Image (cartoon, helix red, strand yellow):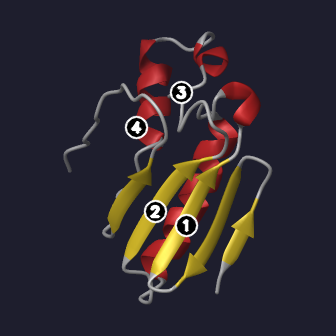
Amino acid sequence: MGSLFSETVQYRTEYPLAWIELNRIHALNALNKEVFVTLGKIMDEISCDKNVRAVIITGNGEKAFAAGADVEELKPLNTITARDFALAAHPLLKKRVLAGLLGKKTGQGFYKYE
């Protein structure tokens, strides 16, 4: 069973599942650069693990799964750097991904064509 823990993201495997939990309750699990970097490392590990068949991603806390991008980190960005920030958050993962959500939900999808 693999595990990778950071202050902002927790990860564990219970084969054939991998579990990812966002852990920025104070910011409604908003995605900042640290979260993106950690998620990238986790996705790399999951991609190489043939025992993982599906990924479940959840958000810690009762108010939000994830509030989206952390607007405090977006404020200083221009159009180009904001686009790069958004694209960096969407690594390609060839596994099934399920989201465990609580409460009301709104949001948008994003698909990067390769």
Q: CA distance from mark 1 to mark 4?
A: 23 Å
In the picture of the structure, the residue carrying the numbered disc 1 is 19
Q: Along the line of sight, which residue is nearer the eye, 81 or 89? A: 89
Residue ID at (54%, 35%) = 66
Give the position of the N terminus as an image quadrant: bottom right
Kindly identify the amino acid type of the residue bearing the numbered disc 3. Ala
- 13 left or right, relative to 89: right
SS label for mark 4 = helix
- First along the sequence among labels 2 and 3: 2
Residue lying furthest left: 113
Indicate which disc residue 67 carries: 3
Instruction: State whether residue 26 is above or below residue 102.
Output: above
Q: Crowding near pointer 4: few (<14 within 10 Å), some, many (20+)?
A: few
- 28 left or right, relative to 6: left
- First along the sequence among labels 4 and 2: 2
Where is residue 38? Give x, y as percent. 64, 54
Q: CA distance from mark 4 to mark 2?
A: 21 Å
Kindly identify the amino acid type of the residue bearing the numbered disc 4. Leu
Give yes or no for contact between labels 1 and 3 (Cβ–Cβ under 8 Å).
no
Q: Is residue 93 visible?
A: no
SS label for mark 3 = loop
Where is residue 32? Give x, y as percent. 63, 33
Kindly identify the amino acid type of the residue bearing the numbered disc 1. Trp
Query: Which of pointers 3 and 4 indicates the residue nearer the eye?
Result: 3
Q: Along the line of sight, which residue is nearer the eye, 53 or 40? A: 53
Kindly identify the amino acid type of the residue bearing the numbered disc 2. Ile
Give yes or no for contact between labels 2 and 3 (Cβ–Cβ under 8 Å).
no
Q: Which corner quadrant of the image does residue 53 belong to?
A: bottom left
- First along the sequence among labels 1 and 4: 1
In the picture of the structure, the residue carrying the numbered disc 4 is 87
Indicate which disc residue 56 carries: 2
